[in-house]
Image (tube, rainbow, N blue to C red):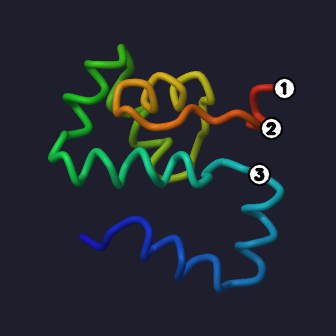
Amino acid sequence: MQPFDRYFREKMKDGAFRALYDAECNVCANTMRIFEKAELDNISLDRLAGEVNAAPEDLEALRDADHCDPHLVIRLCRRLGLAVPEHCPRLRR
């Protein structure tokens, strides 16, 4: 399994993907840090989901950039001791 950050960098090289990414904003540096930290701390998705009162499928969708839930991102950041996003465009929607 390749680390998410390497996968993300490769995807961002594609102009069409980058334009869609910029328009959709389903994944951001905060999301990437969450899953990087969980991996470094050897915290499984199932365990992390339980600790933030979320379904594992919700974390998978967030990780895979299929769906962003900014409130879930905030809970995950707090659980992992990461900075909470201050300027999330999805919080205003």
Task: Identify which residue, 35 or 24, lies in the foreground.
Answer: 35
For disc 3, the neighbor class at 10 Å (few under 14, some 14 to 19, many from 20) is some
Q: Residue at x 73, y 50 (%)?
A: 25
Question: Is 23 above or below relative to 92?
Answer: below
Q: Amino acid at mark 3?
A: Glu
Q: Is residue 71 left or right of residue 56?
A: right
Q: Is residue 80 left or right of residue 70?
A: left
User: Could you say whether the residue bearing mark 3 is in a helix, strand or loop?
Assistant: helix
For disc 1, the neighbor class at 10 Å (few under 14, some 14 to 19, many from 20) is few
The residue singled out by tag 3 in the image is 24
Query: Can you name the residue that lies furthest to the left here?
Result: 42
The residue singled out by tag 1 in the image is 92
Q: Amino acid at mark 1?
A: Arg
Task: Tell me which label, 3 or 2, sits earlier in the chain.
Answer: 3
Q: Amino acid at mark 2?
A: Pro
Question: Is 39 above or below relative to 43?
Answer: below
Task: Tell me whether circle 1 and circle 3 mark residues in contact (CB < 8 Å).
Answer: no
The CA distance from mark 2 to mark 1 is 6 Å
Task: Tell me whether circle 3 and circle 2 mark residues in contact (CB < 8 Å).
Answer: no
Picture disc at residue 89 = 2
Q: Quadrant of the C terminus?
A: top right
Q: Position of residue 21 (x, y in %)?
A: 72, 62
Task: Tell me whether circle 2 and circle 1 mark residues in contact (CB < 8 Å).
Answer: yes
The CA distance from mark 1 to mark 3 is 14 Å
Task: Tell me which label, 1 or 3, sits earlier in the chain.
Answer: 3
